[in-house]
Image: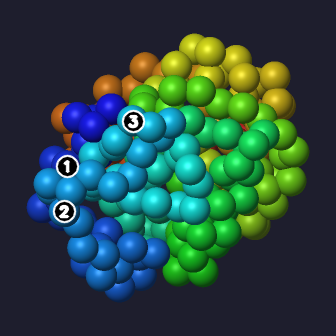
């Protein structure tokens, strides 16, 4: 796990720790000192803490004028024990919402497991972005994670699964990537 780094090819256009609107503004990273871990396995020091013992993130790109953020996730998303959605919502999402972000692309290739509990924070998040014609989507989840999220009925609050599990995004520029997702997800949500 220590070798899994957040995606870094967009760092020439956006760096969260240099963005005054980012919850991670001013953060300094070590390339050599590994301090965070998930179940006794050290993770790469570039991942950002959100107040969870098992879930870490990296804001890969944020565009406040267009109101979107692309966030990569790493670890185990555990609402049952640690209420990870509460930590994620209160410590990261709420801050981005206040800065005008209302469309969220979550990349979950490195989310190993999901354990559900209450859906209150998902519903709250959905209601807040819906008022701004925003949305939440999760890409490239493992099949068992999709099944867990579906059995928790989270598809009522965010888009995931299906074609969203096969998006090849790494070769795209962040704006182009977002536009492609917005075109599909936005159209899907507001035609219903």
- The image shows residue 63 at horizontal and vertical percentages of 38, 68
Residue holding disc 3? 41
Q: Is residue 57 above or below residue 99?
A: above
How crowded pointer 3 is (Cα within 10 Å; few <14, some 14-19, many 20+) is rated as: few
Which residue of the protein is positioned furthest toward the front in this rendering? Answer: 40
Residue holding disc 1? 8
Residue 77 is at least partly visible in this image: yes
Alpha carbon of mark 2 to alpha carbon of mark 3: how far? 17 Å
- Contact (CB < 8 A) between labels 2 and 3? no
Looking at the image, tell me whether mark 2 or mark 3 is earlier in sequence order.
2
Query: What residue do we see at 32% from left, 26% from top?
Result: 168
Residue 70 is at least partly visible in this image: no
Quadrant that contains the N terminus: top left
Image disc number at residue 30: 2
- The image shows residue 174 at horizontal and vertical percentages of 29, 51
Give 182 or 155, whichever is nearer the viewer: 155
């Amino acid at each position: 796990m220590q070798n899994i780094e957040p995606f870094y090819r967009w760092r020439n256009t956006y760096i969260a720790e240099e963005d005054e609107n980012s919850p991670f503004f001013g953060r300094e990273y070590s390339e050599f000192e590994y301090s965070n871990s998930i179940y006794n396995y050290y993770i790469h020091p570039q991942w950002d803490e959100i107040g969870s013992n098992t879930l870490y993130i990296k804001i890969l790109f944020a565009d406040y004028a267009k109101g979107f953020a692309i966030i990569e996730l790493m670890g185990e998303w555990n609402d049952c024990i640690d209420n990870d959605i509460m930590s994620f919502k209160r410590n990261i999402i709420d801050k981005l919402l206040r800065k005008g972000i209302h469309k969220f692309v979550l990349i979950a290739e490195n989310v190993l497991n999901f354990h559900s509990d209450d859906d209150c924070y998902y519903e709250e998040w959905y209601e807040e972005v819906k008022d701004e014609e925003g949305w939440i989507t999760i890409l490239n989840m493992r099949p068992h994670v999709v099944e867990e999220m579906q059995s928790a009925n989270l598809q009522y609050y965010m888009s995931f699964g299906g074609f969203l599990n096969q998006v090849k995004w790494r070769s795209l520029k962040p704006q182009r990537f977002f536009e492609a997702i917005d075109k599909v997800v936005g159209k899907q949500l507001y035609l219903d």
